Image (spheres, rainbow, N blue to C red):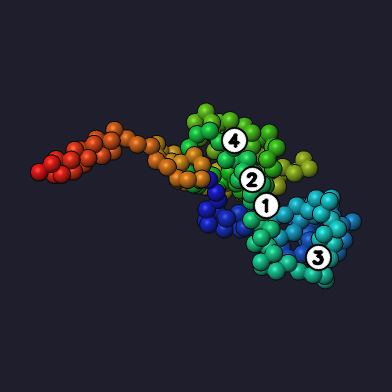
Amino acid sequence: MNISKKGREELIKSEGVRKQIYDDWTGKIVSSYSEITGYPTIGVGHLITDTERDKWKNYFKNGNELTSLQIDLLLKEDIKKFTKPLNDELKVPVTQQMYDALVSYSFNVGNNSSWRKKIIDKINEKDYQGAAEIMGMYPTTSKGNVLQGLVRRRAKESEMFLSGGMPTFFTPIKNTITTYPITTTMLLFSTSFYLYKSKRKKR
């Protein structure tokens, strides 16, 4: 599967868009890495790793700004880091809304989060309600402090997760080639149609 247009829009709303490097702890655009108390971030929640610092060094306050195209391409690459693991780990059907919520959650907490693992385990047990409850409650802290922004985001993701209802028999697990299971009714219809055509040919 992949994130939907609406899911992507909601992710952007949650993360915000910055054309220059900012401190994810304070939300403020900075003039140097030394000013940062949290993590250096740019674009739509793109965390700048130690190996990327030199690449983005000209995008501080009063420096260069990301173009809309750069922001879009960077986000696309970042989303892939979360959709591929999800597609590998999910063993049961999920709705598009569930998937969008999972991408947003993973984007925020990371693929190695213990809470994320618990959510995936609940989903694979088909305990969708239990997964939503964990998603709505954890984590809401950073550096030992409860952040209201995270509280609101968890509630929003949990609500999104359940907004499409429960998965149905026809919900595809992965968005590669969309296939649907062949039912008895479909088989009977196909057989009847074939016999009808055969009789007409004999006349």
**Whole-number angstrom distance, CA of label 3 to CA of label 2:** 25 Å
Name the residue tied to disc 1: 78
Alpha-carbon neighbours of circle 1 within 10 Å: few (<14), some, or many (≥20)? some
Q: Earlier in the sequence, mark 3 or mark 2?
A: 3
- Name which residue type carries label 4: Glu
Residue for point 68% across, 40% down = 111
Alpha-carbon neighbours of circle 3 within 10 Å: few (<14), some, or many (≥20)? many
Is 50 situated above or below 192? below
Residue 59 numbered tag: 3
Q: Which structural element holds mark 2?
A: helix
Residue 89 numbered tag: 4
Q: In which quarter of the image is residue 69?
A: bottom right
Name the residue tied to disc 2: 82
Q: Quadrant of residue 14?
A: bottom right
- Name which residue type carries label 3: Tyr
Q: Which of marks 4 and 3 is nearer the N terminus?
A: 3
Residue for point 72% across, 54% down = 46
Callout 1–callout 4 Cβ contact below 8 Å: no
**Whole-number angstrom distance, CA of label 4 to CA of label 2:** 11 Å
Task: Return the x and y of residue 34 as percentages of the image width and height.
Answer: 89, 56
**Whole-number angstrom distance, CA of label 1 to CA of label 2:** 7 Å
**Whole-number angstrom distance, CA of label 3 to CA of label 1:** 19 Å
Image-based side of 182 in relation to 140, left or right: left
- Name which residue type carries label 1: Asp
Q: Which structural element holds mark 4?
A: helix
Callout 1–callout 2 Cβ contact below 8 Å: yes
Q: Which structural element holds mark 1?
A: helix
Q: As rendered, which of 8 and 170 lies closer to the eye?
A: 170
Is any atom of residue 127 visible in this view?
no
Alpha-carbon neighbours of circle 2 within 10 Å: few (<14), some, or many (≥20)? many
Task: Return the x and y of residue 160 as percentages of the image width and height.
Answer: 52, 47
